[in-house]
Image (cartoon, rainbow, N blue to C red):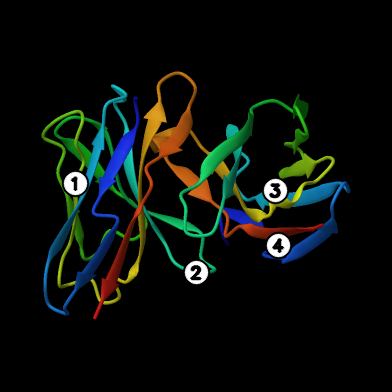
Amino acid sequence: DGGITQSPKYLFRKEGQNVTLSCEQNLNHDAMYWYRQDPGQGLRLIYYSQIVNDFQKGDIAEGYSVSREKKESFPLTVTSAQKNPTAFYLCASKVPGANVLTFGAGSRLTVL
Amino acid sequence: QKEVEQNSGPLSVPEGAIASLNCTYSDRGSQSFFWYRQYSGKSPELIMFIYSNGDKEDGRFTAQLNKASQYVSLLIRDSQPSDSATYLCAVNKNTGNQFYFGTGTSLTVIP
């Protein structure tokens, strides 16, 4: 089945540690996105990438980094510079032509 | 000013009633409008999208767009307990391929 796979589903991290969230899609979509969701704040854009080897910062990119070496993969690294990383992280890709986002199941990060 | 604004609710309706969810957006250049449903602990799933002024119907759901008033709404007819979720409004401005989301409206359908 085609879709977006995010892993891990749950992740616990100690303060000061970097952590990488995986996002893989087999939909052959060009554009991919990372959003963060906190209670009561909706989805906020961290980074997005329209093509391989290119990505742009969203509204809350500080403390995060991404790479786009392959069309299928768009991993997100939450660095120790991110002051409040506990959140639900959502990866999405854009359906070509339809201009619609489809989401992965999400990764919930908790900093202990 | 936020790109997309929604009333956070909670909104409660009895089973079988019509639920009305509303959303306003700030940028008149917005081109595409979306409603997503999100169950607790899950990721958003697309319910409806609308690009042109007027109504668009899909089963029990109707999306309404008024670009002059910068207003998007979602009507859910014959509401069911399974419709209980948070509904997210989103807009796309085409420029930069960015999508902006509201904070969501929590809907509870009471059996």
- Give the percent coordinates (x, y) of residue A111: 25, 76
| Name of the residue lying farthest toward the top | A97
State the CA–CA distance, disc 2 to disc 1. Answer: 23 Å
Q: Compare marks 2 and 1 and give the one earlier in the sequence.
A: 2
Tag nearer the camera, 3 or 4: 3
Residue at x-position 69% and y-position 25%: B52
State the CA–CA distance, disc 4 to disc 1. Answer: 33 Å
Image-quadrant location for residue B76 = top right
Q: Is residue A85 left or right of residue B58?
A: left
Q: Which residue is mark 1?
A: A75
Q: Secondary structure at mark 3?
A: helix
| Name of the residue lying farthest toward the front | B111
Tag nearer the camera, 2 or 3: 3
Q: Which residue is mark 4?
A: B7
Q: Secondary structure at mark 2?
A: loop
Q: Which residue is mark 2?
A: A39
Tag nearer the camera, 3 or 1: 3
Mark 3 and mark 4 in contact? Answer it, CB < 8 Å.
no
Indicate the quadrant containing the C terminus of chain A: top left, top right, bottom left or bottom right.
bottom left
